[in-house]
Image: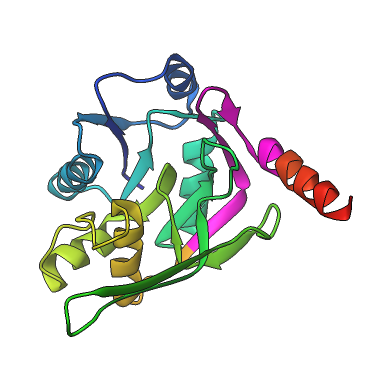
């Protein structure tokens, strides 16, 4: 398996992220794409993966923390035949939530307006591999052939933002239009660096407080 570790970044990366990256096992190829427009950075990284003949691309955002086995575990899921697997990632601002969608629709209407809906997977299966319809791509692995299909069959860049949704959700929508199934492996956990690091524990504690407030 030939995997490109692809890192979209602004003008700098977080120290904690670099510590995790240097400790990550199984890395053979890394490319950092610096730019203020994340969708362009991601599209350029996809081109690197296609031109380099890579089988998979593993996106890792430069404000994440993760275990040293992140790549190996994502690759292990890919080797089972899954074309797209994301780790369990969370928004970095409170009230935080998992960046995975149980349901996602997007449609351009005849008058040019857009109808869309994203239902987040707040009650996701714990420590399991399960199908999703959308996600943020802070830490995920994608089969390069699936992204190449977007370029060749849909005649557009995979991460070009659709109206009213971000570049990562736009790519998810395109993949699903082509019949590619998306999965989350919630046993692979990351942290999102904000003013403090958002982890699964942060989310569960926040959810517990919400429940307690509703009971009082």
Using the rendered image of the protein, determine whether residue 81 is visible from the camera's viewpoint. Answer: no
Location of residue 18 in the rendering, given as x and y in whole percent from the top left corner: 42, 18
The answer to whether 112 is drawn above or below residue 19 in the figure is below
Using the rendered image of the protein, determine whether residue 41 is visible from the camera's viewpoint. Answer: yes
The residue at the point 19 percent across, 61 percent down is: 148
Location of residue 122 in the rendering, given as x and y in whole percent from the top left corner: 63, 58
189 magenta-colored: yes
Q: In the figure, residue 111 lies in which quadrant?
A: bottom left
The residue at the point 69 percent across, 52 percent down is: 127
Location of residue 139 in the rendering, given as x and y in whole percent from the top left corner: 44, 42
Name the outermost residue toward the right: 216
The residue at the point 12 percent across, 47 percent down is: 51
The answer to whether 144 is drawn above or below residue 91 in the figure is below
The answer to whether 51 is drawn above or below residue 8 in the figure is below
The residue at the point 17 percent across, 76 percent down is: 112
Q: Is residue 18 left or right of residue 156?
A: right
Query: Looking at the image, how many numbered discs can be counted on the residues?
Result: 0
Q: Is the image coloured rainbow, by chain, by secondary structure, or in one colour?
A: rainbow
Q: Main secondary structure of the magenta part?
A: strand
**Residue 178 or 63: which is nearer the viewer?**
63
> Which region of the structure is painted magenta?
183-203
Q: Is residue 151 left or right of residue 159?
A: left
Q: In the figure, residue 184 lies in which quadrant?
A: bottom right
41 magenta-colored: no
Name the outermost residue toward the front: 216
**Residue 31 or 90: which is nearer the viewer?**
90
Location of residue 169 in the rendering, given as x and y in whole percent from the top left corner: 36, 58
């Amino acid at each position: 398996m030939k995997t490109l570790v692809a890192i979209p970044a602004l003008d700098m990366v977080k120290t904690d992220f670099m510590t995790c990256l240097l400790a990550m096992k199984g890395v053979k190829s890394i490319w950092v794409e610096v730019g203020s427009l994340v969708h362009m950075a991601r599209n350029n990284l996809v081109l690197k993966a296609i031109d380099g003949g890579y089988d998979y691309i593993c996106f890792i955002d430069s404000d994440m923390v993760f275990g040293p086995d992140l790549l190996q575990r994502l690759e292990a899921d890919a080797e089972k035949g899954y074309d797209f697997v994301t780790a369990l990632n969370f928004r970095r601002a409170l009230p935080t939530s998992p960046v995975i969608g149980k349901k996602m629709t997007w449609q351009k209407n005849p008058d040019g307006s857009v109808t869309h809906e994203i239902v987040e997977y707040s009650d996701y299966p714990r420590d399991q591999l399960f199908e999703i319809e959308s996600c943020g791509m802070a830490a995920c692995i994608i089969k390069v052939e699936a992204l190449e299909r977007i370029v060749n069959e849909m005649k557009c860049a995979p991460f070009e933002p659709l109206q009213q949704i971000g570049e990562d959700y736009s790519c998810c929508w395109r993949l699903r239009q082509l019949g590619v199934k998306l999965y989350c492996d919630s046993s692979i956990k990351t942290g999102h660096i904000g003013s403090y690091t958002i982890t699964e524990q942060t989310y569960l504690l926040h959810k517990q407080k919400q429940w307690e407030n509703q009971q009082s």
